[in-house]
Amino acid sequence: MSFRGFVPLLCLSLVAACAARPFYPLPSKIVNQNRQPLQTSRPYNIAHRGSNGEIPEETAAAYMRAIEEGADFIETDILSSKDGVLICFHDVTLDETTDVADHKVFANRKRTYEVQGVNTTGLFIVDFTLEELKKLRVKQRYKFRDQQYNGKFQIITFEEFISIALDAPRVVGIYPEIKNPVLINQHVKWPNGKRFEDKFVETLKKYGYKGSYMSKDWLEKPVFIQSFAPTSLVYISNLTDSPRIFLIDDVTIPTQDTNQSYWEITSDKYLDFIKEYVVGIGPWKDTVVPVKDNYLQVPTDLVARAHAWDLQVHPYTYRDENSFLHFDFHQDPYQEYDYWLNKIGVDGLFTDFTGSLHNFQEWTSPLPK
């Protein structure tokens, strides 16, 4: 059976077995020495939380769909359960993208914690064990996207996510984020004084992820480690030589661990500093090219300056729906891809619609057969 035919069947089997044990064996049992290598000749297609424009984010089905659609990397956010198991989930609270509200037994778990300087109230992942999290089901974040898969898929662990990539029929990279490390280290404790970042790197090493960018080891198991927290990136530089990406938020949001402004962390002085620890930056796209009244303004020089410091640029997040497309692109996501890849000249894109980006790249810059 072809991989393309396999994915829809997998989605059905996931629906049928969602209450059972995790569907991926750990560690991966599949050995395939002749897989098609990772493409490195054109900008990377990075599946943002999987193909979450179609299937609820950060679920096994969303990642399988992204691989089917041609993703070079599958991207995820790593948090921790109360009992120290690393899981794939974007928000620090469960309220918006799971059915936790339907589980009345958890109603008394609501708490208020400080998250990046803001008091946030909700049902926090750090207050749930893995066993409890596995009882929940994920749902679409946006109401205007397909709702048919709501309530069908579990939260998955970091190890399950890795197994999905390793079991793909071609080499697919992973792009995990060290998410909200300040909060996690405050609320989750591991033996022997280990930190969230230690457990994160240990998991990658367990599955053989190692090597500097474009090394033989890296090409066999590609990975980019990303974080908005520069302290975490500096810390793990002493634990692994795997390439790291410094994420950059909106101009109004300071770094979550060092409280530095956008202007400070995008200065030449700071880029010169951070290049010793990372191979690239991942900025919010509307800070690279400012927007006013939904029209693009004059691009900044951030991409050119990053490239001058030999840093890659992987902006986020590209979404096909009209509500996310600026007027300049005339409701055509291909025009947006063309603008960013060919005019701005970035090195990779985080997209919710992996298939759309893949089709555009195959049309405009096809890989050799």
Image: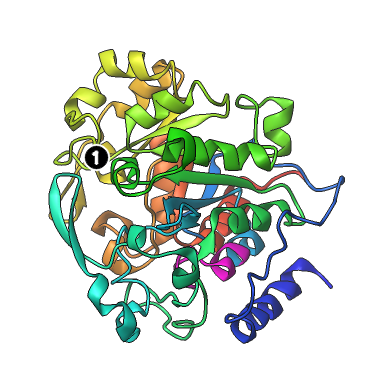
The one of 265 and 331 positioned closer to us in this rendering: 265
Side of 319 relative to 54 (left or right)? left
Give the image location of residue 195, x and y in percent: 42, 36
Q: How is the image coloured?
A: rainbow
Q: Is residue 269 above or below residue 256?
A: above
Helix, strand or loop status at disc 1? helix
User: Which kind of residue does numbered mark 1 sit on?
Assistant: Thr
Q: Is the residue 304 above or below the residue 151 in the image?
A: above
Image position of 165 with respect to 348: above or below: below
- Looking at the image, which is closer to me, 141 or 330? 141
The x and y percentages for residue 36 are 79, 47
Location of residue 330 in the rendering, given as x and y in whole percent from the top left corner: 31, 62
* Residue bounds of the magenta highlight: 52-64
The front one of 222 and 352 is 222
Look at the image and tell me whether residue 222 can be seen.
no
Residue 157 colored in magenta in the image = no
Instruction: Tell me if residue 125 comes above or below residue 198 in the rendering.
Output: below
Q: Is residue 321 visible?
A: yes
- Position of the N terminus, as image quadrant, is bottom right
Near mark 1 (Cα within 10 A), the count class, few <14, some 14-19 or many ≥20, is some
- For the point 63% across and 69% down, the residue is 22
Q: Residue at x 62, y 65 (%)?
A: 64
Give the percent coordinates (x, y) of residue 276: 43, 15
Q: Is residue 209 left or right of residue 99?
A: right
Pointer 1 residue: 287
